[in-house]
Amino acid sequence: MPTDESYWLVRFLLQRGLAVVYLAAFLVAARQFRPLSGEDGLLPLGDYVERASFRERPSLFYLVPDDRVVGASAWTGVGLSIVALLAVPYWLPDRAALPASMCLWAVLWALYQSFVNAGQLFYGFGWESMLLETGFLAIFLGAGSAAPPTVVVWLFAWLLFRNMFGAGLIKIRGDDCWRDLTSMDYHYETQPMPNPGSWVAHNLPKRFHRFETLGNHVVELAVPFLYFAPQPYAAIGGTATILFQAWLMLTGNFSWLNALTIVQAIATFSDGVLTAVLPVDAPATTPTPLPQEVLAVVVAVVVVALSIRPVRNMLSTTQRMNSSYDPLNLVNTYGAFGSITRTRYQLVVEGTDAERPEEGDWTAYEFAGQPVRTDERPPQWAPYHLRLDWQLWFAAMRPRPGPRQRWFLAFLADLLRGDDGTCSLLGENPFPDDPPERVRVSRYRYAFTTPEERAETGEWWTRERIGTYVPPVTLADLQSGGEPDRRSTTV
């Protein structure tokens, strides 16, 4: 990236894209945090306060573990995300634009930090720390007519490089199917949450799957080195990355991971490239204020220093994926799908009011994103994140609930209580008026139908029951067995 390029339009588009991602993230927090990790959540807020230290996992909710504060913080984040999306700091005089922009992005970053650090298992995803790292860098971009500090744009490219190259390395080192180019034979069917395009992609010819797996390696292992090349080569690398992420968005629900990566890729462009391909003109800019330049250099020094451990991890043969090395998630390591599951397992939760239920007395709960009915088309949710559904995918990998699924029995207990918060996380509650007397959980093997099967039956999935995950239980059974919900942390 040559230093004589201008980045006013790059900054403007990057900030608007990041505002959209923040908006989705805070809407998720407003609707889901309290039933999942609030005062009476499946993993209660009190557990976080008891087990963590503020220094290790700082959060406003450590100081004030109150659902009202959680709700106010989430909706404040929604409102400030809209302010950022509307580019309000740009409406102000230049002398006020920079401090207003820095305050706006700093508050968004601090608020979301509180949710990530207090969210426990339900916020344990790589795109959480990635949003925080991206949001931290956005604080120093500025606003108004002044040009952004070029070094901060480079830091966005460095973040994108670690995001993509780390993902490429963990794949090529991990599962054999990435090396023999068969990973896409399984991925679309077994990924956490398929979308409407997943069925189509899964049924493409195997020759195409070999080609796209090879293309994945090129985009993640070779293309990232273009991010630091002169224009137009950096923009070519960014364009390849955006197209790659767009394909992933068309064929899967990966929360805002792909959208956020596209936002980061905007940093590989320059105003000259953008004005050449878009019907926009870059406005005349004034030089970056000296204090902002100095602060940007300080931030760059901090990021370089904090990058040492993530880079060592990335280059290590024992590479860890999606890890943070500081309590503020300033510089992290990334990587996804180092291994691919070959079989899709699903949990089907059913309830009944019958005193002595027969097989036909059980009615299944519908989830918002995980398949239950075989005739239901996989839904599109991303960039909105269904946190319960993602954990259900992880839980189904085991034949019984494990230590990391201690929330699951609390989930069943809430269904037996008819808890409004927990039921709001479902796709459909078959017991809207009175909760069932019993619930049970079966484990199934699901597979996509072929085009021929779909044409004949109208089904999207086939399934086969392979075992009992939780036998029929009542609320009294769960409570007498040491129910691991709001007031207990043992299973």
Image (cartoon, grey):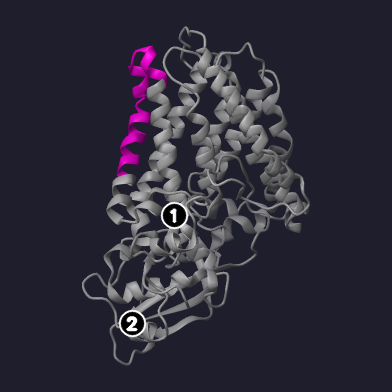
Report the residue at 54% width, 47% height from top: 327
Total numbered badges shown on the rendered structure: 2
Element type at mark 1:
helix
Q: Quadrant of the N terminus?
A: top right
Q: Position of residue 23 (x, y in %)?
A: 38, 39
* Residue at numbered disc 2: 475
Is the magenta region chiefly helix, strand or loop?
Answer: helix
Question: Horizontally, is 435 left or right of 19 in the view?
Answer: left
Report the residue at 44% width, 63% height from top: 50
- For this orientation, the residue located farthest to the bottom is 356
Label 2 Cα neighbours within 10 Å, binned few <14 / some 14-19 / many ≥20 = some
- For this orientation, the residue located farthest to the left is 433
Q: Which quarter of the figure has residue 383?
A: top left
Task: Determine contact: label 1, label 2, CB under 8 Å.
Answer: no
* Residue at numbered disc 1: 118
Q: Which quarter of the figure has residue 407?
A: bottom left
Q: Which residues make up the magenta segment?
A: 75-98
